Image (cartoon, rainbow, N blue to C red):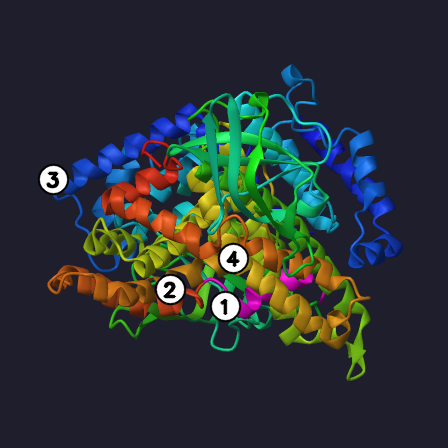
Amino acid sequence: MLRGFHLNGEQLDPSIVALRQEVRDFIAAERASGGFKVGPGLWLRFDPNFSEKLGRRGWVGMTFPKQYGGHGLSALHRYVVTEELLASGAPLRAHWIADRQVGPNLLKFGSEFQKKELLPRIAAGQCYFCVGLSEPNAGSDLASMRTRAVRAEKDNGWVINGRKIWTSIGHRAHYMNLLARTGSDADDRRGGVTQFILDMKSPGVTIRPIINMLGEHDFNEVEFQDVFIPDEWVVGTVGNAWNQLSTELAYERSGSDRWLGSFGLMAGAIDRVGKSPSQAAARLIGAKVAELYTLHRMSFGLGAMLERGETPVVEASIAKDLGTHFEKSMPDLIEALVDEMAPDAMDEGFADILRYARRNSTTMTVKGGAREILRGIIARDLGLR
Amino acid sequence: MMTDKNMIADAAEKLFKDFLTTELRNKVYAGEWPATVWDKLQETGLVEAAVSEARGGTGLDISECCAIAKACGKYAAPVPLVEAYLAEKALAAAGLPPASGLTGIALPMRGSHLKLNRSGGKALLTGSLKQVPWGRNLSAVVAIADEDGHPVTVLVQGPFKEVVHSENAAGEPRDTITLSGHELPATQAGAKGIGLKPHELRAAGALYRCAQMTGAMQTALDMATTYVKQREQFGRPIAKFQAVQQQIAQMASEIVASDGVVSAAIEAAGSGLGLFQIAAAKSRLGKAADMTVDVAHQVHGAIGTTRDYPLHLYTMRVASWRDECGSPNEWSEWIGRLVCRTGGDALWPELTSGFTRVSQ
């Protein structure tokens, strides 16, 4: 049965409160020195220099144990840092997937070799990952994936053939977190799938760009022709990927990145409306702030659940569904408030962010699990399927 | 702590389960006061639950009282229990002694006005209190009167001569009590300017309404999921249709979100602050209420619209409480004005600290 997102005062922990302030001071200094500028794309911008800078500050791989280059902090410390960075519009794309889900997944299922090899580099903000899940004919129906890994016994490894698609930052990532079929066709659709880490520079990997409707090269199609992966890069147990994936998806779907991507728009709109809004404007703004606060509490609560070692798959689905719809409504809010703003308030910088948000937010309810799939997960939990 | 809270809410739930029979509901429809339930609540100490130990009561904290309020919603209890808690809160804040007998609360609202005039050794009340919950049944009502432009808490003893009956969409009594020079003993009026301000009482009421709503929404969800698994059409349970699944999933998401923001409001109220969190909860629950009422009825079809089928007990309460103690629009406006005053740059730091640093 569904659980709420109850906190037991974790957000008031002095170390959490102090950390928030530390991140804010850092952001203010970065803005002042031009370390990053707020602009279209906000946190989705790929900036290895900034990722490394965060690594040096100790704000990547925060939850990894110290022996793996991490800082042994809680999921809530990480939550607070990422929330602050996201709200500021800092560019986080480069290390994001590695930090958000690959690291925790390796900590749970990875071998000692993998952890030693990868976690310190991830924590340094220097090692970037893409995710190899979707295929041309396996989107929402992920269990129908066909990319196959065949055992190469004498070489102590696996040979991969197949194709992945919608691979964000595939052309810039060092590694792919790859799911491939290792079982026979007789296996259960969800059984016989194995998780691998693939070096994107491996021979036989072809990366083709897919330009998105924002005109950006973010997506890729990645083809594998007899790509060899040594045994030491199998993550967890052969055939167990489906079970391992649910943990990873809880990390992927639970965070504040699902609803903070357009925060700059809201803050900008409030300033442009001014200190004495009309009743209609105040209602619109207030309702959105109430939604935002609710999402903030939900994601924080999810952070607390992750910290307690739970796997809140259903709750993360709820947060992602509500969060991405909130984000999608942000440009609508601005449109509704335009009449309340001074005629010259819509400067080009703000208009750029608005345009970007309009295009990008349309894709947010698709990425990381379409809403029909998320709602299906919730319905299953309620015993309806 | 957690265990105690659950135990108290469990006791309330058990009582409601045992006593809210079909027979009793029918009496309530006929306009009868559910004395058996109220007496039992009194017997088990649930009516005095909010009275502090120093004032001779059980001394439950706000989170425990809200757990009871949620139970009231979950079982659609037709009694002014949270109203008793609100009355005590107002009395305690004004330094007036706890009330005895069936004491309700007049929540500040548009159209309500009450003037206190103290002169020549007499205290006289004149005005009109709108939508007083169970006004017709009360032996006394607590209200915030206006005395020369300052709020003053008063305990008004009945019987009231002028009570006009009305009710909310759920059939809960919401009566107008008119007082014309009602004489008040000196001990039943607080000091001028001491006690809750009208908007503070309104916020306290809003928090209880939110807690009640989460309970009633939960029952509506439980009824909907149970029903769609049983009801067969087109040769299978309607739960098997994706269109039905998706609607109920959305409704469940709204309820989970509601629980999250209401727990934030309860937590904040417990530390004496919490206006922003309460406002956020009352605003956010508007959407949840609409979705819940809509989907719960939609999946039930015609049977859910009958009096004998109990769904309306919950949905109509949700719909009514949504707008009581400040509608979502009203609280949204309050938040909107607050954040515009504070400015865009301050929004994030204030939001994450619950707007504790700005004057509300």
Q: Residue at x 72, y 32 (%)?
A: B47
Magenta part, dominant SS? helix
Residue under pointer 1: A370
Crowding at mark 1 (Cα within 10 Å: few <14, some 14-19, many 20+): some
How much space separates mark 2 and mark 1, taking CA atoms? 17 Å
Crowding at mark 3 (Cα within 10 Å: few <14, some 14-19, many 20+): few
How much space separates mark 3 and mark 2, taking CA atoms? 33 Å
How much space separates mark 3 and mark 1, taking CA atoms? 39 Å
Residues at circles 1 and 4 in contact by the CB criterion of under 8 Å: no
Residue B179 visible in rendering: yes
Q: Is residue B201 left or right of residue B294?
A: left
- Residue B157 in magenta stretch: no
Residue under pointer 4: B286
Whether B165 is drawn above or below A360: the answer is above
Nearest to the eye among marks 4 and 3: give it. 4
Chain ID for label 4?
B
Q: Do tags 3 and 2 sit on the same chain?
A: yes
How much space separates mark 4 and mark 3, taking CA atoms? 44 Å
Residue under pointer 2: A329
Could you say whether the residue bearing mark 1 is in a helix, strand or loop?
loop
Whether B139 is drawn above or below A193: the answer is above
Q: What stretch of residues is rendered in magenta? A: A368-385
Q: Amino acid at mark 3?
A: Ser
Q: Amino acid at mark 1?
A: Ala
Crowding at mark 2 (Cα within 10 Å: few <14, some 14-19, many 20+): some
Whether A356 is drawn above or below A95: the answer is below
